[in-house]
Amino acid sequence: MNAVSLLAEIGDVGRDRWRGGYSRHVFEPAETELREWFTEQARRRGLDVETDRNGNLWAWSGMPGPGAVVTGSHLDSVPGGGAFDGPLGVVSALEAIHAVRGPAAVVVFAEEEGGRFGVPCLGSRLLTGSIDAERAVALKDPAGMSVAEAARSAGLDPARFGRDDEALSRIGTFVELHVEQGRGLVGLGSPVAVGSTVIAHGRWRFSFSGQGNHAGTTSMADRRDPMLPAAEVVSAARRVACRAEGARATVGRLVPRPGGTNVIASTVDLWLDARGGVPVDEIVAVAREAAAAEGCAVTVVEESASGEVTFDAGLRRALRSVLGDVPELPTGAGHDAAILAPHVPVAMLYVRNPTGISHAPEEFAEDADVEYGARALAAVLRDLST
Ligand code: HGY
Ligand code: MN
Ligand code: MN
Ligand code: MN
């Protein structure tokens, strides 16, 4: 196994996985370094690479056919993300796929983080038909380019985006390996765990508009500053989530326009990431009240929402029978595996992360655990294919 050296290669190739204001490998032209790197790695393993109609990459071992054992993850990232979230699953899949007897594939889903077009797991949502394709192709990136335009520039036909029954029919079982985004495994003293559930999560966009004006000549009484209600939402998110057991609410992205130091903003957009039972309507009520008090308008749009997902109990038993008495872990992180779970049998494996930090450069997995995870994935895939 050389999952560790493959990870290092992705680090070199995709170091700036976040380029030009959004994540790479999202419907970018086929010559994108990460896509090229993956295709080369697959070729070296005798895998045939194809891009499905929704921009997901598939590397097939043997003829694509029903009942295949499929594994993989994503290569896109969040701004300032770590080196393991996504790539660990892809390199482990490349290393483990040889263990499968019969049709098998490594899949790299597009836009898992939703960092470019705003909807997480866009590639797997399109594949399963769990997002309206019309809405999806109209989504725009921070530079104003639509999914449709980006897809065309990558040689894809946006008119063909949407549920792909043929691709879905090929998946007998999907197993995703992922770095743990927390310290559960450190506490349990185990290098790997089997995934049990993914908590409910969603994203809401709050758009406030007021009156842009001069910072020095506008009296405090004459202002309609959208930054005020926006700030109220940021603190309300924290307050409301702290009251709800296990809930998590985050405002990680807030965009005032025009964004001048000496300019009262005319609009402010912010995105709420809410998980595990946050009473979002309470936060929306705060937004409306604060906007009205400041003489601002506000609109709130739900950009994506997924309910809680429990992975296939039979598969969880099967993985634990192969791996021995490994723990099961719930997670607050979303994954393509959770989008696929209502459609095909799905399982997840997590690998220990000593820092417990994710979506930040401190995200980490020890070499020994990386190799252990790749071997565990191979053992599981072999068992699933016999
Ligand atoms: O945001 C998430 O939960 C995942 O890392 N995409
Ligand atoms: Mn992530
Ligand atoms: Mn991920
Ligand atoms: Mn001036």
Image (cartoon, grey):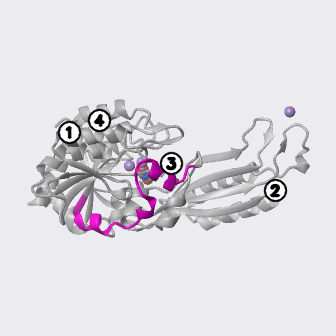
Q: Residues within 10 Å of mark 2 (few under 14, many from 20)?
A: some
Q: Residue at horizontal 65%, vertical 58%? A: 206
Q: Secondary structure at mark 2?
A: loop
Is 11 on the left or on the right of 224, as rendered? left
- For the residues bearing labels 1 and 2, Cβ distance under 8 angstroms: no
Where is mark 1, residue-wise? 371
* Rendered location of residue 143, percent (x, y): 58, 45
Range covered by the magenta-colored residues: 145-174
* Residue bearing the label numbered 3: 116
Amino acid tagged 2 = Glu
Whether label 4 touches label 3, CB < 8 Å? no
Task: Tell me the residue at 75%/55% (across/down).
Answer: 209
Please name the residue that numbered disc 4 is placed on.
7
Q: Give left or right: position of 215 versus 121.
A: right
For label 1, the SS is helix
Q: Is residue 99 left or right of residue 306?
A: left
Task: Report how far apart the C-alphas of labels 1 and 4 lie in the structure.
Answer: 11 Å
